[in-house]
């Protein structure tokens, strides 16, 4: 958010405040409390769908993970589907030939998932899925995974959810992706910040680093293997690039003054930064191969939080060059700068959708909300109504926006669909969570 950089000028941020002392500790292994999710809407227009519990073949009473429950939760959270309650299922078939299609049609269900999970020994499992079109009485998806370690069963459930989502919507699912975020916990008057990465549903959180000092603005590399972020080591801002496994960590910007708002280019070869090493806070682009810098803006105002256009040929950024924060676009080939946001007196923190159509932003009007500008139609909509929303970030399929919010003076994350019809809240039980970044599709 624009006011975040203003706060950085005095080594503070509106949410992340505290003494900037001590050192940073890389902690790649210990577990964290997972995010909890609250679905805030009833989704009355969602499509009914039946997810039958997968048949279990093993030595124990239950499989190590309830894959069908994970799939139900994923589809429900998308806002597009309403899974039938388990108590309402008329049968629990495992094979296609066991399905009475008329029985399921009476439930007003168009699609049905069945399958099984088999224990292959040595913590290895085989999973089979059959996704059926009830109306046409045919199988539309049939998949089998063998020799899957127990720790990867949740990932298989996310992949199955993605397959179903794409089959029914024509849009690639984003359940098998990750999110990054920063948590803040206070113990005995001391603050502890943790940069974490978790699955898109908040499970399997892994700490990337811990610090008694603020951590800000995480940004994913396009291959999903690294994060760039702002750390306040040595009492001032630095930009660091770190691999998720903690084996690689490098400070790429430690200039005099502000070092902030890193953003990877779509091809991963460049990074946009906000630097004030030459006086005012301006937008620069760093070549990641040789660390050379190109200055894109030259203005007395604060210019920050650059976001790359989907084609990599321009950048959107915040500037108060007109007196109030607004969003501008700078073209890399010509250096031309044009204003993009015109609705209201405050627009900041731009984020572009993966397909380049939508521009999300923080819109100030009776509070700070998430606004969405359709760059094709120039239509602008306010998607959220909570008081202090910031840091919008798109899912890799462009269907949802993850953002930070303040609820009862507690920092939480929330997700809203681009049409504003569905929403959910993510929080930690003990502490606050902020600075979200939704990662790219992964080949895990």
Image (cartoon, helix red, strand yellow):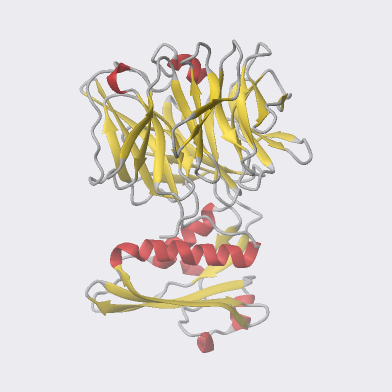
Residue 104 pos. (x, y %) = 59, 77
Residue 74 against residue 384 in the figure, above or below: below
- Using residue 29 as the reference point, say whether residue 344 is left or right of it: right
Residue 33 appears anywhere in the view? no
Image location of residue 272, percent across then percent down: 52, 31
Q: Which residue is located at x 69 percent, y 43 percent?
A: 357
Residue found at the very far bottom of the displayed protein: 97
Residue 171 visible in rendering: yes
Q: Nearer the viewer, residue 160 or 197?
A: 197
Residue 173: percent from left, percent from top: 55, 58
Looking at the rendered structure, the number of numbered marks drawn on it comes to 0
Question: What residue sits 50% from the left and 63% below the top?
Answer: 161
User: Which one is in front, 233 or 394?
Assistant: 233
Residue at left offset 45%, top offset 38%: 288
The image shows residue 216, relative to residue 157, as above or below, that is above
Front-most of residues 432 and 361: 361
Instruction: Tell me if 246 is positioned left or right of 199 in this view.
Output: left
Q: Work out which quarter of the rendered image holds the C terminus and state it.
A: bottom left
């Amino acid at each position: 958010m624009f006011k975040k950089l203003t706060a950085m000028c005095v080594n503070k941020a509106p949410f992340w405040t505290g003494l900037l002392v001590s050192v940073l500790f890389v902690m790649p292994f210990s577990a964290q409390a997972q995010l909890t999710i609250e679905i805030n809407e009833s989704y009355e227009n969602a499509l009914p769908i039946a997810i039958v519990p997968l048949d279990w073949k093993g030595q124990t009473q239950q499989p190590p993970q309830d894959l069908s429950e994970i799939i139900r939760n994923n589809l429900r959270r998308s806002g597009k589907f309403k899974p039938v309650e388990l108590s309402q299922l008329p049968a629990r078939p495992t094979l296609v030939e066991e399905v009475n299609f008329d029985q399921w049609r009476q439930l007003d269900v168009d699609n049905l998932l069945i399958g099984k999970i088999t224990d292959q020994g040595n913590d290895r499992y085989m999973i089979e899925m059959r996704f059926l079109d009830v109306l046409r009485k045919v199988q539309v998806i049939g998949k089998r995974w063998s020799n899957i370690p127990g720790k990867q069963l949740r990932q298989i459930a996310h992949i199955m959810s993605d397959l179903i989502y794409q089959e029914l919507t024509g849009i690639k699912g984003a359940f098998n992706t990750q999110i990054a975020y920063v948590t803040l916990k206070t113990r005995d008057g001391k603050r502890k910040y943790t940069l974490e990465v978790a699955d898109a549903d908040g499970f399997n959180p892994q700490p990337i680093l811990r610090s008694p000092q603020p951590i800000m603005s995480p940004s994913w590399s396009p291959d999903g293997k690294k994060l760039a972020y702002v750390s306040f080591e040595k009492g001032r801002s630095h930009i660091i690039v770190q691999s998720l496994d903690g084996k690689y960590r490098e400070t790429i910007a430690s200039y005099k003054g502000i070092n902030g708002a890193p953003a990877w280019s779509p091809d991963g070869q460049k990074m946009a930064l906000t630097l004030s090493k030459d006086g005012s806070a301006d937008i620069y682009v760093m070549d990641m191969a040789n660390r050379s810098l190109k200055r894109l803006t030259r203005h007395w105002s604060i210019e920050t939080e650059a976001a790359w256009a989907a084609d990599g040929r321009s950048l959107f950024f915040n500037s108060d060059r007109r007196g109030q924060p607004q969003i501008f676009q700078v073209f890399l080939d010509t250096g031309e700068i044009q204003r993009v946001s015109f609705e209201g007196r405050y627009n900041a923190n731009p984020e572009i959708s993966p397909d380049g159509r939508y521009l999300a932003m923080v819109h100030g009007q009776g509070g700070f909300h998430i606004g969405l500008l359709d760059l094709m139609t120039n239509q602008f909509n306010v998607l959220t109504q909570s008081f202090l929303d910031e840091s919008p970030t798109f899912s890799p399929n462009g269907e949802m926006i993850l953002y930070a919010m303040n609820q009862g003076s507690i920092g939480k994350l929330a997700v809203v669909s681009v049409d504003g019809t569905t929403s959910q809240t993510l929080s930690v039980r003990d502490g606050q969570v902020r600075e979200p970044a939704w990662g790219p599709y992964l080949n895990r």
